[in-house]
Amino acid sequence: MKKVILSVAVIVAMGLTSCKNEAKQETETTTTEVSKEMAMADITFGVRGNCGMCKNTIEKAASAIEGVGNATWDVDKKKIDVSFDATKTDAMAIHNAIAASGYDTQKVAGSEDAYKDLPGCCKYEHDMEMNQSGEEKE
C-alpha cells in the first residue's frame, strides 16, 4: 500500500512540476518594445517667391530633408512653417535646402545657378519683404 501511495505521489508531483514549468515559461516570456523619442520642433521663417510653382518647389525642397514632417509656404506672407524632428535635422539644413533650390531665405541667399533655371513667373525681387506676419520663430 505504501508503494501505491508513493507511486501516486510521484506521479502527482511530476504533473505539478510540469505545470509549474509551463506556467513559469509563460511568465518569463515578455515582449520588449523600443520606442524612439522624437524631439519635434516648429520653425517659421521668410522665403522669397511669387507663385504656386514657387510654393511647390520651396515645400518640396524643405520636405526632402530627413526628419521634416510638414512644410507649408504662404505665398502672400512669404513665410514657411516647418515641423521637423530635431534629432534628425536642424533649421540651417532646411534653410540651405531651400536656398539650393534657388530661393532666398532669411538666413541663406538662394543659389544663383538654381535661380537662373527657375521659370519666369518664379523670378522674384531680391529685396522683397519676407515673413510679413512677424519675426522669425525658432
Image (cartoon, grey):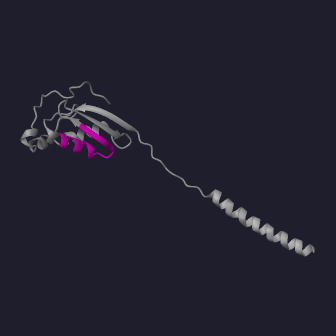
**12 and 117: which one is in front?**
12
- Rendered location of residue 35, percent (x, y): 47, 47
The residue at 19%/29% (across/down) is 77
**48 and 76: which one is in front?**
76
Q: Is residue 96 left or right of residue 20?
A: left
The residue at 17%/31% (across/down) is 76
The residue at 45%/43% (across/down) is 37
- Rendered location of residue 132, percent (x, y): 20, 26
| Location of residue 13 (image quadrant) | bottom right
Q: Is residue 13 left or right of residue 64?
A: right
Q: Which residue is at the far left?
A: 120
Taking 19 as reference, is 123 above or below it? above
| Location of residue 105 (image quadrant) | top left
Taking 10 as reference, is 60 above or below it? above
Q: Is residue 8 left or right of residue 71?
A: right
Quarter the N terminus occupies: bottom right
**Residue bounds of the magenta highlight:** 55-72
- Residue 136 shown in magenta: no
- Rendered location of residue 70, percent (x, y): 30, 41
The residue at 54%/53% (across/down) is 32
Taking 3 as reference, is 47 above or below it? above
- Residue 66 shown in magenta: yes
